[in-house]
Image (tube, rainbow, N blue to C red):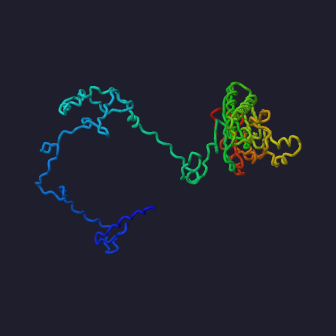
Amino acid sequence: MSHMPQRAALPKCPNCAEPVEPGDRFCGACGYDLSVVPALPQDPPTLTMDASGRSAPDGTGWPVAPGTDGSGTPAAVHLPTDLPGTDSGGSPLPAPAAGPPAPGVRFDRPQETEEHRQQTPEEHRQQTPEEYRPQEPEEYRLQAPDPRVAAEPATPAEAAQVCVACRAGRVDDDGYCENCGHAQPRERDHMERESGPIAAVSDRGLRHHRNEDAFTVGHTALPDGSPAALAVVCDGVSSATRPDEASLAAAQAAGEALLSALPRGTHPQQAMHEAIVAASQAVNALADEPAGAREHAPHQNAPACTIVGAVVTSGLLVVGWVGDSRAYWVPVDRGAPSARLTEDDSWAAQMVAAGLMTEAEAYADERAHAITGWLGADAYELEPHTASFKPDRPGVVVVCTDGLWNYAETAEEMAEAVPLDAAVRPLHSARVLVGHALDGGGHDNVTVAVVPFPALPQGAGSA
Protein backbone atom coordinates (compact mmCIF):
# COMPACT_ATOMS: atom_id res chain seq x y z
CA MET A 1 0.00 0.00 0.00
CA SER A 2 1.13 3.50 -0.59
CA HIS A 3 2.21 5.82 2.14
CA MET A 4 0.57 9.18 2.40
CA PRO A 5 2.99 12.05 2.87
CA GLN A 6 2.99 13.56 6.34
CA ARG A 7 1.81 17.11 6.59
CA ALA A 8 4.49 19.51 7.77
CA ALA A 9 4.09 20.94 11.29
CA LEU A 10 2.25 24.23 11.36
CA PRO A 11 4.21 27.33 12.44
CA LYS A 12 3.46 28.67 15.87
CA CYS A 13 2.52 32.11 17.03
CA PRO A 14 5.62 33.75 18.54
CA ASN A 15 3.45 35.26 21.26
CA CYS A 16 1.17 32.42 22.48
CA ALA A 17 2.73 29.40 20.69
CA GLU A 18 -0.63 28.47 19.16
CA PRO A 19 -0.43 26.94 15.67
CA VAL A 20 -1.18 29.25 12.77
CA GLU A 21 -1.88 28.57 9.07
CA PRO A 22 0.55 29.66 6.37
CA GLY A 23 -0.54 33.02 5.01
CA ASP A 24 -2.28 34.15 8.25
CA ARG A 25 -1.55 37.76 9.10
CA PHE A 26 -2.84 37.58 12.72
CA CYS A 27 -2.91 34.84 15.33
CA GLY A 28 -6.42 33.44 15.78
CA ALA A 29 -5.87 32.86 19.51
CA CYS A 30 -4.26 36.07 20.75
CA GLY A 31 -4.47 38.41 17.76
CA TYR A 32 -0.72 38.85 17.49
CA ASP A 33 0.42 40.59 14.32
CA LEU A 34 2.31 37.85 12.49
CA SER A 35 3.71 40.30 9.91
CA VAL A 36 5.98 41.83 12.55
CA VAL A 37 9.54 40.67 11.97
CA PRO A 38 10.77 39.06 15.21
CA ALA A 39 13.95 40.29 16.75
CA LEU A 40 17.02 38.35 15.91
CA PRO A 41 18.19 36.03 18.69
CA GLN A 42 21.48 36.66 20.40
CA ASP A 43 24.39 34.94 18.74
CA PRO A 44 26.48 33.38 21.53
CA PRO A 45 30.11 32.57 20.79
CA THR A 46 30.93 29.16 19.53
CA LEU A 47 32.17 26.85 22.30
CA THR A 48 34.52 23.95 21.85
CA MET A 49 33.26 20.63 23.09
CA ASP A 50 35.19 17.78 24.67
CA ALA A 51 34.55 14.11 24.10
CA SER A 52 31.73 14.04 26.68
CA GLY A 53 29.86 16.78 24.89
CA ARG A 54 30.59 19.42 27.59
CA SER A 55 32.12 22.75 26.78
CA ALA A 56 35.81 22.81 27.43
CA PRO A 57 37.12 25.52 29.77
CA ASP A 58 40.19 27.52 29.02
CA GLY A 59 43.55 25.81 29.80
CA THR A 60 42.29 22.33 29.10
CA GLY A 61 45.07 19.99 27.89
CA TRP A 62 44.35 18.33 24.55
CA PRO A 63 45.61 14.84 23.73
CA VAL A 64 48.55 14.66 21.34
CA ALA A 65 47.57 13.40 17.91
CA PRO A 66 49.44 10.26 16.87
CA GLY A 67 52.15 10.70 14.26
CA THR A 68 53.19 14.18 15.40
CA ASP A 69 56.25 15.44 17.22
CA GLY A 70 54.18 16.59 20.19
CA SER A 71 54.41 20.30 19.32
CA GLY A 72 51.32 20.29 17.15
CA THR A 73 53.24 20.13 13.89
CA PRO A 74 51.71 17.45 11.66
CA ALA A 75 53.81 14.78 10.10
CA ALA A 76 54.77 14.90 6.44
CA VAL A 77 51.89 14.20 4.09
CA HIS A 78 52.19 11.10 1.93
CA LEU A 79 50.86 11.20 -1.62
CA PRO A 80 48.82 8.20 -2.78
CA THR A 81 51.63 7.29 -5.16
CA ASP A 82 54.12 7.13 -2.27
CA LEU A 83 52.34 4.25 -0.56
CA PRO A 84 52.33 0.69 -1.86
CA GLY A 85 48.88 -0.36 -3.09
CA THR A 86 47.25 -3.73 -2.65
CA ASP A 87 44.28 -5.43 -4.21
CA SER A 88 41.24 -6.73 -2.32
CA GLY A 89 43.19 -9.84 -1.26
CA GLY A 90 46.12 -7.90 0.17
CA SER A 91 48.51 -8.76 -2.69
CA PRO A 92 50.67 -6.01 -4.24
CA LEU A 93 49.27 -4.40 -7.37
CA PRO A 94 51.06 -5.18 -10.65
CA ALA A 95 53.44 -2.54 -11.90
CA PRO A 96 52.01 -0.33 -14.66
CA ALA A 97 53.17 -1.22 -18.15
CA ALA A 98 55.73 1.13 -19.62
CA GLY A 99 54.88 3.00 -22.79
CA PRO A 100 53.19 6.10 -24.13
CA PRO A 101 49.89 7.20 -22.58
CA ALA A 102 46.64 5.99 -24.00
CA PRO A 103 45.47 7.98 -27.01
CA GLY A 104 42.85 10.63 -26.49
CA VAL A 105 43.95 11.43 -22.93
CA ARG A 106 44.66 15.00 -22.03
CA PHE A 107 47.49 15.82 -19.59
CA ASP A 108 47.36 19.30 -18.11
CA ARG A 109 50.70 18.72 -16.32
CA PRO A 110 53.85 16.92 -17.38
CA GLN A 111 54.44 13.47 -15.98
CA GLU A 112 56.85 13.41 -13.07
CA THR A 113 59.94 11.28 -13.43
CA GLU A 114 61.46 9.13 -10.69
CA GLU A 115 64.08 11.83 -10.19
CA HIS A 116 61.36 14.40 -9.55
CA ARG A 117 59.59 12.17 -7.04
CA GLN A 118 62.77 11.72 -4.99
CA GLN A 119 63.32 15.44 -4.69
CA THR A 120 62.44 17.15 -1.44
CA PRO A 121 59.94 20.01 -1.32
CA GLU A 122 62.80 22.43 -0.84
CA GLU A 123 64.48 21.16 -4.02
CA HIS A 124 61.16 21.51 -5.89
CA ARG A 125 60.85 25.11 -4.77
CA GLN A 126 64.37 25.92 -5.95
CA GLN A 127 63.72 24.66 -9.45
CA THR A 128 62.56 26.99 -12.22
CA PRO A 129 59.52 26.04 -14.25
CA GLU A 130 61.78 25.27 -17.22
CA GLU A 131 63.86 22.87 -15.13
CA TYR A 132 60.80 21.20 -13.68
CA ARG A 133 59.24 20.54 -17.12
CA PRO A 134 62.04 18.90 -19.09
CA GLN A 135 59.69 16.38 -20.75
CA GLU A 136 56.67 18.61 -21.44
CA PRO A 137 55.34 17.79 -24.91
CA GLU A 138 55.21 20.53 -27.52
CA GLU A 139 51.43 20.12 -27.96
CA TYR A 140 48.88 18.25 -25.91
CA ARG A 141 46.27 16.09 -27.60
CA LEU A 142 43.00 17.71 -26.65
CA GLN A 143 39.94 15.60 -26.11
CA ALA A 144 37.78 18.46 -24.89
CA PRO A 145 36.45 21.07 -27.38
CA ASP A 146 38.71 23.91 -28.33
CA PRO A 147 37.79 26.79 -25.96
CA ARG A 148 38.31 29.28 -28.81
CA VAL A 149 35.51 27.64 -30.75
CA ALA A 150 33.23 27.62 -27.74
CA ALA A 151 33.88 31.31 -27.23
CA GLU A 152 32.47 32.18 -30.67
CA PRO A 153 28.96 33.66 -30.52
CA ALA A 154 26.29 31.12 -31.33
CA THR A 155 24.16 31.68 -34.43
CA PRO A 156 20.83 33.07 -33.30
CA ALA A 157 17.94 30.68 -33.85
CA GLU A 158 15.31 31.64 -36.39
CA ALA A 159 12.25 33.27 -34.91
CA ALA A 160 9.31 30.91 -34.64
CA GLN A 161 6.52 31.53 -37.13
CA VAL A 162 3.37 32.89 -35.53
CA CYS A 163 -0.11 31.75 -36.55
CA VAL A 164 -1.90 34.14 -38.91
CA ALA A 165 -5.27 33.24 -37.34
CA CYS A 166 -4.81 33.53 -33.55
CA ARG A 167 -1.53 35.51 -33.62
CA ALA A 168 -0.41 33.57 -30.54
CA GLY A 169 0.41 29.96 -31.35
CA ARG A 170 3.62 28.67 -32.87
CA VAL A 171 3.44 27.00 -36.28
CA ASP A 172 4.76 23.43 -36.36
CA ASP A 173 6.74 21.81 -39.16
CA ASP A 174 3.55 20.56 -40.82
CA GLY A 175 2.17 24.08 -41.22
CA TYR A 176 -0.47 23.99 -38.46
CA CYS A 177 -0.85 26.23 -35.40
CA GLU A 178 -0.06 24.44 -32.14
CA ASN A 179 -2.56 26.68 -30.34
CA CYS A 180 -5.69 26.81 -32.52
CA GLY A 181 -4.87 24.14 -35.15
CA HIS A 182 -5.38 26.55 -38.05
CA ALA A 183 -3.61 25.57 -41.28
CA GLN A 184 -1.14 28.28 -42.30
CA PRO A 185 -0.90 29.68 -45.84
CA ARG A 186 1.57 27.85 -48.02
CA GLU A 187 4.05 29.70 -50.18
CA ARG A 188 1.96 29.01 -53.30
CA ASP A 189 -1.37 29.90 -51.71
CA HIS A 190 -0.98 33.44 -52.98
CA MET A 191 1.75 34.55 -55.37
CA GLU A 192 2.37 37.87 -57.09
CA ARG A 193 5.12 38.72 -59.54
CA GLU A 194 6.12 41.57 -61.80
CA SER A 195 8.61 41.37 -64.65
CA GLY A 196 9.10 44.71 -66.32
CA PRO A 197 5.80 45.75 -67.91
CA ILE A 198 3.86 42.55 -67.15
CA ALA A 199 2.50 41.00 -63.96
CA ALA A 200 0.73 37.88 -62.69
CA VAL A 201 -1.17 36.87 -59.55
CA SER A 202 -2.18 33.38 -58.40
CA ASP A 203 -4.42 32.47 -55.48
CA ARG A 204 -5.56 29.20 -53.90
CA GLY A 205 -9.18 30.31 -53.94
CA LEU A 206 -11.79 29.70 -51.27
CA ARG A 207 -12.55 26.00 -51.69
CA HIS A 208 -9.35 24.17 -52.68
CA HIS A 209 -6.94 22.90 -50.02
CA ARG A 210 -3.90 23.94 -52.09
CA ASN A 211 -2.95 25.95 -55.15
CA GLU A 212 -2.39 23.68 -58.16
CA ASP A 213 -1.82 26.58 -60.59
CA ALA A 214 1.55 28.00 -61.60
CA PHE A 215 2.82 30.77 -63.85
CA THR A 216 5.93 32.33 -65.37
CA VAL A 217 6.37 35.90 -66.55
CA GLY A 218 9.41 37.45 -68.19
CA HIS A 219 10.73 39.92 -70.69
CA THR A 220 13.66 39.93 -73.05
CA ALA A 221 14.94 41.57 -76.25
CA LEU A 222 14.80 40.32 -79.82
CA PRO A 223 17.94 40.33 -81.98
CA ASP A 224 17.05 43.78 -83.36
CA GLY A 225 16.84 45.17 -79.81
CA SER A 226 13.06 45.50 -79.71
CA PRO A 227 11.33 44.34 -76.51
CA ALA A 228 9.40 41.11 -76.07
CA ALA A 229 7.26 40.06 -73.11
CA LEU A 230 5.85 36.65 -72.24
CA ALA A 231 3.52 34.98 -69.78
CA VAL A 232 2.76 31.27 -69.23
CA VAL A 233 -0.08 30.00 -67.03
CA CYS A 234 -0.64 26.34 -66.13
CA ASP A 235 -3.51 24.62 -64.30
CA GLY A 236 -2.88 21.26 -62.61
CA VAL A 237 -5.41 18.50 -63.30
CA SER A 238 -6.86 17.69 -59.89
CA SER A 239 -7.80 14.12 -60.79
CA ALA A 240 -4.14 13.34 -61.52
CA THR A 241 -1.39 12.74 -59.02
CA ARG A 242 0.84 15.68 -57.98
CA PRO A 243 -0.95 18.29 -60.13
CA ASP A 244 0.83 21.14 -58.36
CA GLU A 245 4.20 19.72 -59.38
CA ALA A 246 3.02 19.24 -62.96
CA SER A 247 1.88 22.85 -63.37
CA LEU A 248 5.07 24.22 -61.83
CA ALA A 249 7.33 22.06 -64.00
CA ALA A 250 5.43 23.01 -67.16
CA ALA A 251 5.42 26.75 -66.43
CA GLN A 252 9.12 26.82 -65.65
CA ALA A 253 10.11 24.75 -68.68
CA ALA A 254 8.00 26.82 -71.09
CA GLY A 255 9.28 30.12 -69.69
CA GLU A 256 12.90 29.03 -69.94
CA ALA A 257 12.39 27.83 -73.52
CA LEU A 258 10.85 31.15 -74.61
CA LEU A 259 13.51 33.26 -72.91
CA SER A 260 16.16 31.17 -74.65
CA ALA A 261 14.61 31.04 -78.13
CA LEU A 262 13.38 34.63 -78.63
CA PRO A 263 16.79 36.38 -78.27
CA ARG A 264 18.22 33.94 -80.86
CA GLY A 265 15.77 35.19 -83.47
CA THR A 266 13.32 32.28 -83.40
CA HIS A 267 9.93 33.38 -84.68
CA PRO A 268 7.61 33.91 -81.68
CA GLN A 269 5.05 31.42 -82.99
CA GLN A 270 7.71 28.74 -83.48
CA ALA A 271 9.19 29.58 -80.10
CA MET A 272 5.75 29.12 -78.50
CA HIS A 273 5.35 25.70 -80.15
CA GLU A 274 8.77 24.60 -78.88
CA ALA A 275 7.99 25.93 -75.41
CA ILE A 276 4.82 23.83 -75.15
CA VAL A 277 6.76 20.75 -76.27
CA ALA A 278 9.40 21.45 -73.62
CA ALA A 279 6.66 21.84 -71.01
CA SER A 280 5.14 18.52 -72.04
CA GLN A 281 8.48 16.76 -71.67
CA ALA A 282 8.95 18.25 -68.22
CA VAL A 283 5.56 16.95 -67.08
CA ASN A 284 6.18 13.53 -68.64
CA ALA A 285 9.41 13.26 -66.66
CA LEU A 286 7.41 13.44 -63.43
CA ALA A 287 5.80 10.11 -64.31
CA ASP A 288 9.20 8.38 -64.21
CA GLU A 289 8.86 7.57 -60.52
CA PRO A 290 10.34 4.49 -58.81
CA ALA A 291 8.32 1.31 -58.61
CA GLY A 292 6.00 1.34 -55.63
CA ALA A 293 5.83 5.13 -55.41
CA ARG A 294 2.18 5.07 -56.44
CA GLU A 295 1.09 2.31 -54.07
CA HIS A 296 -0.89 4.84 -52.04
CA ALA A 297 -2.74 6.15 -55.13
CA PRO A 298 -2.84 3.27 -57.65
CA HIS A 299 -5.91 4.59 -59.48
CA GLN A 300 -4.67 8.12 -60.10
CA ASN A 301 -3.40 9.20 -63.47
CA ALA A 302 0.11 10.47 -64.15
CA PRO A 303 0.86 14.12 -63.31
CA ALA A 304 -0.95 16.40 -65.75
CA CYS A 305 -1.81 20.06 -66.38
CA THR A 306 -3.08 22.50 -68.97
CA ILE A 307 -1.05 25.36 -70.43
CA VAL A 308 -1.63 28.71 -72.09
CA GLY A 309 0.99 31.30 -73.00
CA ALA A 310 1.35 34.63 -74.76
CA VAL A 311 4.29 36.41 -76.38
CA VAL A 312 3.96 40.11 -77.15
CA THR A 313 6.37 42.13 -79.29
CA SER A 314 6.15 45.65 -80.72
CA GLY A 315 3.74 44.57 -83.45
CA LEU A 316 2.89 40.89 -82.97
CA LEU A 317 0.81 38.92 -80.49
CA VAL A 318 1.26 35.13 -80.30
CA VAL A 319 -0.69 32.70 -78.11
CA GLY A 320 -0.32 28.97 -77.57
CA TRP A 321 -2.29 26.48 -75.48
CA VAL A 322 -3.27 22.91 -74.66
CA GLY A 323 -6.34 22.35 -72.48
CA ASP A 324 -8.96 24.82 -71.28
CA SER A 325 -6.87 27.69 -69.91
CA ARG A 326 -7.54 30.82 -71.97
CA ALA A 327 -6.19 34.08 -73.39
CA TYR A 328 -8.37 37.19 -73.99
CA TRP A 329 -7.74 40.39 -75.91
CA VAL A 330 -9.02 43.56 -74.24
CA PRO A 331 -8.29 46.87 -76.05
CA VAL A 332 -7.58 50.06 -74.18
CA ASP A 333 -10.41 51.69 -76.13
CA ARG A 334 -13.38 49.84 -74.73
CA GLY A 335 -15.44 51.00 -77.67
CA ALA A 336 -13.52 48.47 -79.79
CA PRO A 337 -14.48 44.79 -79.51
CA SER A 338 -12.63 42.43 -77.21
CA ALA A 339 -11.99 38.82 -78.20
CA ARG A 340 -11.21 35.38 -76.86
CA LEU A 341 -7.98 34.19 -78.50
CA THR A 342 -8.07 30.45 -77.63
CA GLU A 343 -10.43 27.51 -78.11
CA ASP A 344 -10.80 25.00 -75.28
CA ASP A 345 -9.74 21.39 -75.53
CA SER A 346 -12.88 20.31 -73.69
CA TRP A 347 -16.05 18.26 -74.05
CA ALA A 348 -18.17 21.41 -74.30
CA ALA A 349 -16.05 22.88 -77.10
CA GLN A 350 -16.30 19.62 -79.05
CA MET A 351 -20.09 19.60 -78.71
CA VAL A 352 -20.30 23.18 -79.99
CA ALA A 353 -17.83 22.57 -82.85
CA ALA A 354 -19.80 19.50 -83.95
CA GLY A 355 -23.03 21.50 -83.94
CA LEU A 356 -24.63 19.15 -81.44
CA MET A 357 -25.27 21.78 -78.78
CA THR A 358 -25.27 25.53 -78.44
CA GLU A 359 -22.51 27.10 -76.39
CA ALA A 360 -24.94 27.90 -73.56
CA GLU A 361 -26.24 24.35 -73.52
CA ALA A 362 -22.78 22.79 -73.66
CA TYR A 363 -21.32 24.84 -70.82
CA ALA A 364 -24.38 24.25 -68.68
CA ASP A 365 -23.74 20.50 -68.85
CA GLU A 366 -21.87 18.86 -65.95
CA ARG A 367 -19.37 17.45 -68.47
CA ALA A 368 -18.49 20.88 -69.83
CA HIS A 369 -15.07 21.12 -68.11
CA ALA A 370 -13.93 17.60 -68.98
CA ILE A 371 -10.76 18.35 -70.96
CA THR A 372 -9.77 16.47 -74.09
CA GLY A 373 -6.22 17.79 -74.27
CA TRP A 374 -3.54 18.18 -71.59
CA LEU A 375 0.15 17.77 -70.84
CA GLY A 376 1.06 14.46 -69.22
CA ALA A 377 2.41 11.00 -69.83
CA ASP A 378 -1.08 9.53 -70.27
CA ALA A 379 -2.33 12.27 -72.63
CA TYR A 380 -3.36 11.66 -76.19
CA GLU A 381 -1.02 12.68 -78.98
CA LEU A 382 0.28 16.16 -78.16
CA GLU A 383 -1.15 18.84 -80.43
CA PRO A 384 0.05 22.31 -79.37
CA HIS A 385 -2.22 25.07 -80.62
CA THR A 386 -0.63 28.37 -81.67
CA ALA A 387 -2.02 31.50 -83.27
CA SER A 388 -0.66 34.91 -84.28
CA PHE A 389 -2.42 38.28 -84.26
CA LYS A 390 -1.50 41.84 -85.26
CA PRO A 391 -3.74 44.17 -83.25
CA ASP A 392 -4.23 47.63 -84.71
CA ARG A 393 -4.49 49.37 -81.35
CA PRO A 394 -3.04 49.12 -77.84
CA GLY A 395 -4.57 46.83 -75.29
CA VAL A 396 -3.81 44.01 -72.87
CA VAL A 397 -3.75 40.23 -73.12
CA VAL A 398 -5.35 38.43 -70.17
CA VAL A 399 -3.86 34.95 -69.73
CA CYS A 400 -5.78 32.91 -67.14
CA THR A 401 -7.02 29.59 -65.83
CA ASP A 402 -10.68 28.58 -65.61
CA GLY A 403 -10.66 29.73 -62.00
CA LEU A 404 -11.08 33.25 -63.43
CA TRP A 405 -12.99 32.79 -66.68
CA ASN A 406 -15.68 30.76 -64.88
CA TYR A 407 -16.77 34.17 -63.54
CA ALA A 408 -16.14 36.13 -66.76
CA GLU A 409 -16.63 33.62 -69.55
CA THR A 410 -17.33 35.75 -72.60
CA ALA A 411 -14.97 38.35 -74.01
CA GLU A 412 -17.43 41.09 -73.10
CA GLU A 413 -17.65 39.92 -69.49
CA MET A 414 -13.87 39.77 -69.24
CA ALA A 415 -13.54 43.28 -70.65
CA GLU A 416 -15.95 44.54 -68.00
CA ALA A 417 -13.87 42.96 -65.23
CA VAL A 418 -10.53 44.33 -66.49
CA PRO A 419 -9.71 47.82 -65.07
CA LEU A 420 -9.51 50.66 -67.57
CA ASP A 421 -5.86 51.39 -66.68
CA ALA A 422 -4.73 47.77 -67.07
CA ALA A 423 -2.13 48.66 -69.72
CA VAL A 424 -0.24 50.93 -67.30
CA ARG A 425 -1.04 49.10 -64.04
CA PRO A 426 -0.83 45.39 -64.87
CA LEU A 427 -0.15 44.20 -61.29
CA HIS A 428 -3.07 46.16 -59.89
CA SER A 429 -5.28 44.79 -62.67
CA ALA A 430 -4.23 41.19 -61.99
CA ARG A 431 -5.12 41.66 -58.32
CA VAL A 432 -8.52 43.09 -59.28
CA LEU A 433 -9.27 40.12 -61.55
CA VAL A 434 -8.32 37.61 -58.83
CA GLY A 435 -10.56 39.51 -56.44
CA HIS A 436 -13.37 39.33 -59.01
CA ALA A 437 -13.12 35.52 -59.00
CA LEU A 438 -12.97 35.32 -55.20
CA ASP A 439 -15.98 37.59 -54.88
CA GLY A 440 -17.81 35.28 -57.28
CA GLY A 441 -17.21 32.27 -55.04
CA GLY A 442 -13.56 31.28 -55.61
CA HIS A 443 -14.47 27.63 -56.23
CA ASP A 444 -11.17 26.94 -58.02
CA ASN A 445 -7.57 28.12 -57.98
CA VAL A 446 -7.30 31.51 -59.70
CA THR A 447 -4.31 32.58 -61.81
CA VAL A 448 -4.12 35.52 -64.21
CA ALA A 449 -1.34 37.36 -66.05
CA VAL A 450 -1.80 40.78 -67.66
CA VAL A 451 0.44 41.54 -70.65
CA PRO A 452 0.25 45.02 -72.25
CA PHE A 453 0.39 45.36 -76.06
CA PRO A 454 2.53 46.54 -77.71
CA ALA A 455 5.46 45.38 -75.63
CA LEU A 456 6.92 48.19 -73.56
CA PRO A 457 10.68 48.80 -73.23
CA GLN A 458 12.46 46.94 -70.45
CA GLY A 459 12.28 48.74 -67.11
CA ALA A 460 8.68 49.85 -67.54
CA GLY A 461 6.34 48.54 -64.84
CA SER A 462 3.18 49.18 -62.95
CA ALA A 463 2.43 52.78 -62.17
How far across and how far down the image is residue 223, in percent?
68, 25
Q: Nearer the viewer, residue 277 or 316?
A: 277
Res 356 → quadrant:
top right
Q: Residue at x 69, y 50 (%)?
A: 207
Vertical order, 133 against 44 (above or below): above
* Quadrant of the frame with the N terminus: bottom left
Res 332 → quadrant:
top right
Q: Residue at x 87, y 45 (%)?
A: 357
Q: Nearer the viewer, residue 370 or 82?
A: 82
Left of 55 or right of it: where is 296?
right
Q: Residue at x 23, y 63 (%)?
A: 41
How far across and how far down the image is residue 246, in percent?
69, 37
Q: Residue at x 56, y 48 (%)?
A: 171
Count of marks overlaid on the render? 0
Q: Is there any visible trace of residue 2 in the rendered image? A: yes
How far across and how far down the image is residue 137, in percent?
32, 27
Q: Is there any visible trace of residue 236 in the rendered image? A: no
* Quadrant of the frame with the C terminus: top right
How far across and how far down the image is residue 76, in percent?
18, 39
